[in-house]
Amino acid sequence: MKMLIDGEWVDSSSHETIPVLNPYTGEVLDQVPAAAREDVDRAIESAVKGQKKWNRLKIRDRAEILRAYLELLKRERDGLARLLTLETGKPIFDSYGEIDSVSMTFESSIEIVKHHYGKTMPMGIEGGYDDDLQITVHEPLGVIACIVPFNFPAALWAFKAGPALMAGNAIVVKPATSNPLTVLKLMGLLVEAGVTPEAVQCITGQGSKVGNWICKNPALAQVNVTGGVRAGIEIAKQAAEHLTSYKFELGGNDPLIICKDCDMDLAVNEAGDKTRNAGQCCSGAKRFIVHNSIKEEFVTRLIEERLKTVKTGDLLDINTDFGVLISEEAAKEVEKQVALTVEQGARLVYGGHRTGAFYEPTVLMNVTPDMDIAKDMEVFGPVYPIIGFDTLEEAIDIAECSHYGLSAGVITENFQDAMTVAGALRSGMVAVNGSGGFRAQELPFGGGKKMSGNSRECISSVLEEVTQEKSIIFRYAMKKFHAYEQKAEV
């Protein structure tokens, strides 16, 4: 596939390409351009012009175009899900769910912008301004760069693109290098639906180069990134040169505290969610902090009831529910992290085997709070480090020993213990009787705490991130009205 610049499918000006591999088979799926600096600058320059055209459309007209887009998503649903599976290594069942979430996000974006109201300031509370009408309106930021990760490329692209476009912004999208094909297809469908072509640019290439070139461009209004902490810090440095706004969701090492009074069926089920997307989730339990009195039972049931029952095989089979990691290199990294944890004293009790990009669900016992995996070593794979505790205070201390603060969970039947944990953990979200993997469209999601970022990406508050509030004052606008009121009283 080619990249989308200025409404056209184009090659890189350098004619360099990058292969896109099927992580399940290792076969080459396609080639995409490796963008040059001039391609990036041209795309952003075009987006600046496109944003003005797109924003001139009435909100109801933008809504009509994006509703046409929803119809195209229905038409292309099967092909999009298949393509997503081929380039990500996730089962087709999960891919269908992800494509459907794109439709839901765009549908929600249409509705929230239609009801994004301004404010009128109360009069008569400040001397000298009694006759002034003061109001606020919302305006788009301008051009927003959307840097998309590999783990949920379609869903996370939609969370960035849908609200931004509906609010009148232009987007310059940088999909993940490893799997950009579905995002490219989704972007092309926007043009087909009638979105101003220059308002939807999609650039492919290595993130370390293309991402930096994008962030250095002074024409950007905002950079919206889902990725790793190191990438976020580097992008923030680039954006700071021009005081470009940035919104980050940078991952985490989410704790799941399982108390001795827990509903064990629920605990095993919530922990089993870790196998989703082969454990490649920013949110979702990554540290399992289990009361020592139930630790053995929990591990036994987790292995027997959830991990041994995952269905592997043909990823295009609707019954398969466990896939592969994004690459063999990613699987090797997980393998190395497990080996380090065992070297530090943990005991491997289940799994631990890798074949290519496949890494089987793995359970590690005897993990202690001083080990890397218990603190800031985020494992992007299906690994269960089990850390024991005796008191709730100890569990909270273990959970808080990480610099991440994305999400967390606690499984308990005790309301007071649940509230104690929810209040004590410095994370963007705490799920009671659930894991950090909980994500609802309306609920604020993201870091907001520690090193996990500053975005609160969701439908209920996303417009605060993609628009800006402008104050408009009509001086003395109410003078005659107030004079009329006084005359009428006489």
Image: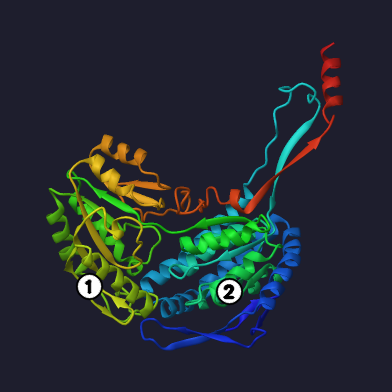
The alpha-carbon separation of the residues under discs 1 and 2 comes to 34 Å
Going from the N terminus, do you reach mark 1 or mark 2 first?
2
Q: How many marks?
A: 2
Say what amino acid the circle numbered 1 marks: Gly
Residue shown at 61%/62% (left/top)? 238
Instruction: Report the residue at 33% width, 75% height from top.
Output: 331
Q: Taking 7 as reference, is 305 above or below it?
A: above
Q: Is residue 161 above or below residue 429?
A: below
Q: Position of residue 92 (x, y in %)?
A: 38, 75
Locate residue 321, reporting x and y percent: 30, 71
The label on residue 209 is 2
Q: Position of residue 312 (x, y in %)?
A: 27, 77
Dots 1 and 2: beta carbons under 8 Å? no
Residue sitting farthest toward the top: 490
- Asked whether 251 or 106 is in front, the reply is 251
Residue underneath mark 1: 352
Could you classify mark 1 by the number of other residues whose Cα lies within 10 Å: few (under 14), some (14-19), or many (20 or more)?
Answer: some
Helix, strand or loop under label 1: loop
* Figure quadrant of residue 244: bottom right
Give the quarter of the figure containing the N terminus: bottom right
Viewer-side residue, 159 vs 394: 394
Quadrant location of the C terminus in the rendered image: top right
Amino acid carrying label 2: it is Lys
Q: Which mark is residue 49?
A: none
User: Which one is nearer the viewer's eye here, 409 or 117?
Assistant: 409
Res. 17 image quadrant: bottom right
Horizontally, is 383 left or right of 93 in the view? Answer: left
Q: Is residue 66 visible?
A: yes
Q: Residue at x 68, y 70 (%)?
A: 194
Q: Specify whether 417 is left or right of 172.
A: left
